Image (cartoon, coloured by chain):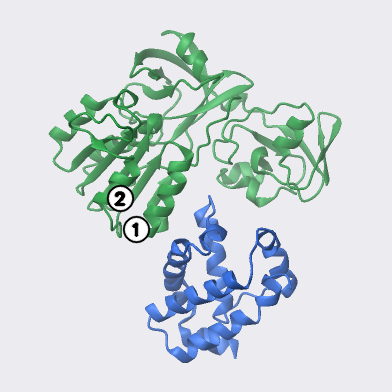
């Protein structure tokens, strides 16, 4: 299903359009902005691009172990379910802003949900 | 933990430690300045091709191919055999041609460097006090000027800035590196509005960029916000007002964050004043220089004000502590 989702949503062009909307939203969201506030904004934006590509079912394949390792330092700083929910909420709002159909947004949300336990180190 | 082989000795490099920090902790002093992977003062060379790519960001491809790397951002993934990059043949001799006091704590230093053929206004050089100590200074001049100009602010306990302020004289010879940095004007969008925000001696590269843009017939509006705590902390105010009076598209706004704000100055921090005047930066190009916290906040706020990320230019200088 995932490559189909990636094509339906518009492929890499859709990722590029969504990255700016999404990253501006999370940086403006006081609940989670600290986790995204990197001195190196380009590097941070590149991470968000990889995340969105994955969430859109695109050609980025993280293993559960990658997810655990990549977020362990954030879990140590207190990353929890409420932050995870806030990120998904911002992603959904970004896609709504870009007029992505609701059923595709639901699929993106489902992809994100599969990563929750690994991201939060559960 | 990995091992570093350097000058026939072996040193331990802890996880999360850079090559620069590991060697310094064990008594080996490598010349450095920005500690941020920008200024290239701490360049070293690896005997093998096992250099983490993040430690080669910004280096010329010819240097990357020879396994040169920046010690201050190098986290080894395996044992490395390293040596100091021989940079003596890459340094340029320059003669001090002028020293002018700009305000209580900033001096303009003019350098004549005949070997330096080409640079971009807004780039920076490393100025060497001796072979071991260098500091980065942005160029306030444009290439058509007859000499290079630096704005040197005296820092408390600054080993290079105090030497420049107290000992350097016209006629002295100094060593500098070739200019580096990617914070400069490009003439590819002459109608694009430009926003430049600087604090303290961060004015230097912005001054060069403004003059370069005007020399290249930039047609869009150019706004320069220079901030300080008080009027005494600003400098070149009259020259910049004069420039603005002669160029209809150049606007100069000196800003004062302290309580005492004379007429003809804006009250508030430069960043806040600029963003209040220009809340939507979509399509703008933004240049930032000065206090690292200001630059960090400004990058974020400019981006949130809809400036595209690749239209925001700043060289990530860190003041080299009290070293």
Reply above or below: B9 against A21: above
The residue tagged 2 is B275
> x%, y% of residue B195?
30, 46
> x%, y% of residue B106?
39, 21
The answer, for residue B121, to whether it is visible in the render is: no
Secondary structure beneath dot 1 equals: loop
State which quadrant residue B23 falls in: top right
Reply above or below: B230 against A69: above
Nearest the viewer among B86 and B311 is B311
Q: Are marks 1 and 2 in contact (CB under 8 Å)?
A: yes
Shown colour of chain A: blue
Residue A58, numbered label: none
The residue tagged 1 is B305
> x%, y% of residue B323?
61, 24
Q: Chain of mark 2?
A: B
Q: Chain of mark 1?
A: B
Shown colour of chain B: green
Q: Residue at x 44, y 67 (%)?
A: A25
């Amino acid at each position: 299903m995932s490559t189909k989702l990636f094509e339906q949503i518009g492929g890499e062009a859709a990722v590029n359009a969504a990255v700016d909307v999404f990253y501006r939203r999370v940086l403006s969201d006081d609940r989670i902005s600290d986790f995204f506030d990197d001195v190196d904004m380009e590097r941070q934006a590149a991470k968000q691009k990889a995340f969105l590509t994955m969430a859109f079912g695109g050609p980025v394949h993280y293993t559960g172990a990658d997810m655990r390792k990549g977020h362990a330092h954030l879990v140590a700083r207190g990353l929890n379910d409420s932050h995870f929910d806030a990120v998904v909420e911002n992603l959904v709002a970004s896609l709504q802003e870009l007029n992505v159909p609701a059923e595709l947004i639901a699929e993106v949300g489902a992809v994100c949900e599969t990563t929750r336990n690994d991201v939060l180190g559960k | 933990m990995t091992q570093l082989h350097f000058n026939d000795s072996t040193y331990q490099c802890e996880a999360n430690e850079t090559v620069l920090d590991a060697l310094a902790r064990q008594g080996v002093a490598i010349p450095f300045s920005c500690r941020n992977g920008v200024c290239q003062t701490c360049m070293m060379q690896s005997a093998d091709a096992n250099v983490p790519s993040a430690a080669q960001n910004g280096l010329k491809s010819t240097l990357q191919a020879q396994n040169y790397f920046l010690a201050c951002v190098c986290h080894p993934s395996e044992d490395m055999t390293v040596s100091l990059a021989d940079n003596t043949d890459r340094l340029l001799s320059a003669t001090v041609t002028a020293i002018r006091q700009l305000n209580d704590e900033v001096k303009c230093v003019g350098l004549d460097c005949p070997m330096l053929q080409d640079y971009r206004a807004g780039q920076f050089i490393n100025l060497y006090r001796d072979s071991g100590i260098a500091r980065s200074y942005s160029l306030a001049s444009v290439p058509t000027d007859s000499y290079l100009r630096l704005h040197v602010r005296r820092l408390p306990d600054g080993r290079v800035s105090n030497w420049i302020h107290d000992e350097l004289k016209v006629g002295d010879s100094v060593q500098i590196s070739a200019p580096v940095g990617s914070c400069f004007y490009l003439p590819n969008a002459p109608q694009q509005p430009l926003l430049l925000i600087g604090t303290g001696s961060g004015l230097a590269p912005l001054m060069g960029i403004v003059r370069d843009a005007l020399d290249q017939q930039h047609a869009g509006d150019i706004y320069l916000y220079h901030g300080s705590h008080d009027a005494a902390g600003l400098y070149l105010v009259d020259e910049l007002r004069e420039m603005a009076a002669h160029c209809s598209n150049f606007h100069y706004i000196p800003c004062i964050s302290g309580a005492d704000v004379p007429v003809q100055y804006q009250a508030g921090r430069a960043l806040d004043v600029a963003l209040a005047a220009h809340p939507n930066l979509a399509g703008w190009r933004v240049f930032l220089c000065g206090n690292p916290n200001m630059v960090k906040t400004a990058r974020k706020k400019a981006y949130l004000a809809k400036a595209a990320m690749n239209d925001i230019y700043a060289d990530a200088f860190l003041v080299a502590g009290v070293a």
